[in-house]
Image: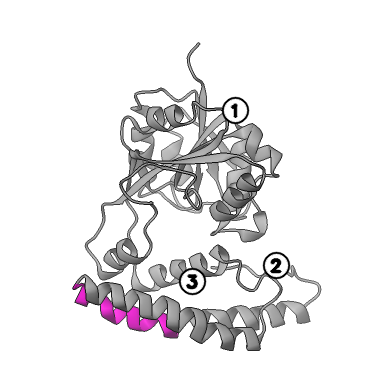
Amino acid sequence: MATRVSLYIPCLNVEGYIAPVLEGVLHQSLPVDEILIVDDGSTDRTVEIAGRYPVTIVRHERNRGLAPARNTGFLRSRNDLVAALDADCVPDATWLETLVSAMANPSVALAGGKLVETRLDSVADRWRQSHMPQDWGDARIVNPKFVFGSNTVARKSAVDEVGGYDERMRTNGEDVDLSQRLRARGHDFIYEPAALVRHLRRDSVASVLSAYWRWWRFGVNAYADGVRLSSIAATFYRAHFRTSFLQCAAKDLRERKFGLLPLDLLVPVYMPYRDLRLYFDARTSARTPNLSREVKTP
């Protein structure tokens, strides 16, 4: 009996990307049994474009975040093997077949492939490639630190066992958190670089720095107990200056990527700025009890 795989794509305003991603899905060497588009409140032509393809569209009435969209994808999938692609990741033809093969051992709950950057015209895009890689290199790894969420195959039963994605994380870090909870239950992971996806994302300086801050905040669960001025001050030197800035600058100097240094210099300015914004947003929310207490991260 052929292996049946569901595949979902979480989407938010991706009209410029979704068509080539779906073309890649439809040309897999292992055909996908069902394709789910989880639209998280798009206001552009994402749903219209996706609707031209043989997909099932599931819509959130409002933007809820990536983690809730992932949970919806698993909830609506009819198969135990569930593949996921970010909406700006075009899979190579053998991507799904390669990851499904990596899941042959029933102890493996999650497998992920390698993301290759293809849009490198701007300084922001090249900085993302250098400092925000979504892969573990060129060698196959059993039980990497975690599996990047951009392109995966998972067992629905295992994800359900640990309670799905933590929706408090909204847009970042949900993949790290899920990996940690699966590992705690004794499940194995595979990183398989032969399973390739090609990243179509384009960034500006503002958008790449915003993404970098969210990676940091949610990736290390920063301010999980509430953001305070004392924690912001302590974090500036320990994390934003000593770790983020110095490591980025040292890497770019070592690799002679001198054009990235101006953006490196913005890191220790932008990161505490976002921390302070989070702090003041939390205080404003606390003073308005009739509004939602959730502090949302743009």
Nearest the eye: 11 or 237? 237
Identified at 62% across, 45% down, the residue is: 182
Mark 1 sits on what residue? 80
Residue identified by numbered label 3: 213
Label 2 to label 1, Cα distance in Å?
A: 33 Å
Report if residue 60 is visible in the image.
no
Q: Which kind of residue does numbered mark 1 sit on?
A: Asp
Circle 3 sits in a helix, a strand or a loop, which is it? helix
Q: Residue furthest right?
A: 289
Circle 2 packing at 10 Å, graded few (<14), some (14-19), many (20+), is few
* Residue indicated by mark 2: 294
Residue at 76% x, 79% y is: 286
The coloring applied to the image is one colour
Residue 100, given in percent of the width and then of the height, sits at 45, 29
Q: Main secondary structure of the magenta part?
A: helix
Q: Is residue 157 visible?
A: yes
Of marks 2 and 1, the one in the foreground: 1
Q: Residue furthest top?
A: 1
Mark 2 or mark 3, earlier in chain: 3
Q: Earlier in the sequence, mark 1 or mark 3?
A: 1
Depth check, front residue: 271 or 231: 231
Identified by mark 3, the residue type is Trp
The percent coordinates of residue 52 (x first, y second) are 41, 32
10 Å neighbourhood of mark 1: few (<14), some, or many (≥20)?
A: some
When the figure is inspected, residue 61 is found, relative to residue 287, above or below; the finding is above
Q: Position of residue 141 (x, y in %)?
A: 41, 44
Secondary structure of the residue carrying tag 2 is: loop
- What is the magenta range? 256-270
Nearer the N terminus, badge 2 or badge 1? 1
